[in-house]
Image: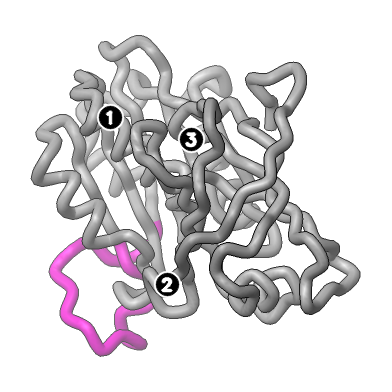
């Protein structure tokens, strides 16, 4: 990951709100510091101050922002594993202070709108793409954007309804959500099933070699997507990625 900033700024912010956005996934809302600017797709580092719990994983975590730059607050989302950091973030009182560094990261939308953008997301890897999709709609960008979003079940798919609303709002944005374990779901699903494959991409993309590809999620998923794109003769220069470890 490469920062846009030679010197990453440091802030102290307050936790304003939190709530569940999918089974086992929570969203956290923080105040946006005065003068803080970032690009959709970038991330921040949060550092807990005197947390009620701590462990060997430490008190720092990196989170992609799910908020868009035009929004008043900063939003992140996290899979709620049983770690001291996440237990503390869930337990500390609202208005608690947290240290923040950022923004960082280079996985932002390319400028050439003649090249479509293809987002390949698995699970909590959806977070930077939520920000990018919001921003594209708000700024009325002319880029064609295709978001392939893989989850086990609809119950696990954070921000699914928000993304479906954005698809209706922005005619240049296409959501292709797919589920891999529908036999474990209690919900109805009429969309795609199975993993993201070259065949699934070809079903929605006229020319697989034209877009700029972005992928984020668990390392195993990201490596699978990179391998698939390489085997499809996609240039490494046209692939941007971020691994989400420990989430």
Which image quadrant for residue 103? top right
Q: Earlier in the sequence, mark 3 or mark 2?
A: 2
Q: Is residue 9 left or right of residue 217?
A: right
The residue identified by callout 2 is 19
Which label lies toward us, 1 or 2? Answer: 2
> In this rendering, does residue 75 appear at all?
yes
In the image, the segment drawn in magenta is 178-195
Question: Measured from the top left, where is residue 135 in percent x and y?
Answer: 31, 32
- Disc 3 versus disc 2: distance between alpha carbons? 22 Å
Outermost residue on the right side: it is 56
Residue 243 position (above or below residue 42): below
Residue contact between numbered discs 1 and 2, judged by CB atoms under 8 Å: no
Residue 122's place in the image compared with 144, above or below, is: below
Nearest the viewer among 195 and 17 is 17
Q: Are marks 1 and 3 in contact (CB under 8 Å)?
A: no
> Does the segment drawn in magenta span residue 154?
no
Q: Position of residue 32 (x, y in %)?
A: 50, 41
| Magenta segment main secondary structure | loop
The part of the image, by quadrant, that contains residue 60 is bottom right
Q: Which residue occupies the foreground of this view, 233 or 246?
A: 246
Residue under label 1, please give it: 136
Question: In the figure, 230 relative to 193: above or below?
Answer: above
Mark closer to the observer (3, 2) = 2
Residue 183 falls left or right of residue 224 = left
Name which residue lies at 23% across and 26% down.
144
Q: List x then y, in percent, for residue 244.
A: 62, 53
Mark 2 closeness class: few <14, some 14–19, many ≥20 residues within 10 Å: few
Which residue is identified by label 3?
41
First in sequence: mark 1 or mark 2?
2
Badge 1 crowding class, 10 Å Cα cut-off, few under 14, some 14 to 19, many 20 or more, is many
C-alpha distance separating marks 1 and 3: 11 Å
Q: Is residue 183 magenta?
A: yes
């Amino acid at each position: 990951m490469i920062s846009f900033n030679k010197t990453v700024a440091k802030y102290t912010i307050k936790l304003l709100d939190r709530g569940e956005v999918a089974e086992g996934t929570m969203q956290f809302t923080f105040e946006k510091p005065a003068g803080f600017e970032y690009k959709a797709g970038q991330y921040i580092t949060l550092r807990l101050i005197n947390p009620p719990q701590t462990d060997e994983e430490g008190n720092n975590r990196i989170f992609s922002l799910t908020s868009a730059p035009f929004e008043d607050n900063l939003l992140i989302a996290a899979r709620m594993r049983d770690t001291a950091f996440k237990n503390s973030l869930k337990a500390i009182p609202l208005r608690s202070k947290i240290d923040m560094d950022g923004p960082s990261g280079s996985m932002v939308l390319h400028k050439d709108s003649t090249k479509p953008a293809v987002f390949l997301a698995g699970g909590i890897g959806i977070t930077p793409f939520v920000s990018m999709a919001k921003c594209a709609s708000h700024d009325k960008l002319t880029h064609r954007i295709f978001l392939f979003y893989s989850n086990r079940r609809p119950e696990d798919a954070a921000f699914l309804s928000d993304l479906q609303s954005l698809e209706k709002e922005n005619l240049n944005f296409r959501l292709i959500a797919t589920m891999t374990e529908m036999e474990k779901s209690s919900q109805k699903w009429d969309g795609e099933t199975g993993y993201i494959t070259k065949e699934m991409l070809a079903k929605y993309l006229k020319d697989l070699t034209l877009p700029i590809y972005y992928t984020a999620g668990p390392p195993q998923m990201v490596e699978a997507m990179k391998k698939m794109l390489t085997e499809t003769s996609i240039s490494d220069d046209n692939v941007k990625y971020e691994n989400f470890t420990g989430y």
